[in-house]
Image (cartoon, helix red, strand yellow):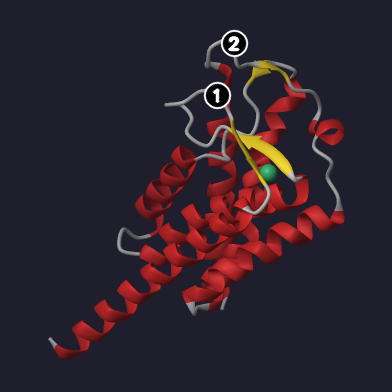
Amino acid sequence: MQTKVLFIVKTSFVYGTLAFLFSMVGLSLPSTVTYVVGSPLEVSGISVEHIVGHIVFGLMVSALSLNLRYFILGGIFPIVLDADHLIQFFNFEMVPRMAHSIAFGFLASFVLLMFFGKRDYRLGSIAFAAMLAHISFDILLGGKTAFPLLTPFVVEPLTFQGYDWIVIEIIAIAIVGICTLITKIQARKKLFV
Ligand SMILES: [Zn+2]
């Protein structure tokens, strides 16, 4: 029990720290896309429904892990991903929401697998899918909103709207589902070796 709680705390801490560190990449992008964003307390509209929404959308994805600790991580990762907003307090010229990107999803999966077990496919999939679940809810809540999804390869933010959130949430669910399936098949194979 204790090790499970420790695992959740450690992985969540690493995920949030990575989101913050990755936001610094946004300082180095061309001045055509950077600007002073302003305090996240003023510009980001933090509300109870925002937080609850992120947790629920994450849990819908991580439910397919069929495992309690990954399920819980699915609720936490989308919240700590917003650590990429903290850098806005410094009033630098930057691209906001850097962790709302595919590059961050891959980086987070890679680093977590390095630290916590290379064959933990479900952990890797949750790390990536939590990013998708997060932007899915941001689109639903914001109506029309933009993320640097393909940063740093495409520096301009991409705009999403309407029902885009459904497609993105379904992709997130599929990623975790497939990785759970792979994990189960491998576990079964081991039984027969
Ligand atoms: Zn967000």
Type of amino acid at the residue the image marks with label 2:
Thr
Residue that appears at 74% across and 60% down: 53
Regarding residue 10, the answer to whether it shows in the image is no
Whether residue 49 can be seen here? yes
**Viewed as shown, does residue 93 lie left or right of 173?**
right
Callout 1 secondary element: loop
Spot occupied by residue 45 in the image (x, y as percentages of width and height): 84, 41
Left or right of 88, for residue 62: left
Q: What is the spatial separation of the Cα atoms under label 1 and label 2, in whole angstroms?
A: 9 Å
Front residue of 167/147: it is 167
Quarter the C terminus occupies: bottom left
Q: Position of residue 148 (x, y in %)?
A: 56, 32
Residue furthest out toward the left = 193
Q: Please state which of residues 149 and 10 is positioned toward the viewer in this rendering.
A: 149
The part of the image, by quadrant, that contains residue 145 is: top right
Residue 65 % position (x, y): 48, 74
Task: Label 2, secondary structure: give it.
Answer: loop
Disc 1 residue crowd, few under 14, some 14–19, many 20+, Cα 10 Å: some
Depth check: give the residue in front, 91 or 159: 159
**Label 1 is placed on what type of residue?**
Glu
Q: Earlier in the sequence, mark 1 or mark 2?
A: 2
The reply to whether discs 1 and 2 touch (Cβ–Cβ < 8 Å) is no
Q: Which residue is mark 2?
A: 32
Mark 2, residues whose alpha carbon is within 10 Å: few (<14), some, or many (≥20)?
few
The residue under label 1 is 156
**Residue 184 rendering spot, x and y as whole percentages:** 33, 80
* Screen quadrant of the N terminus: bottom right
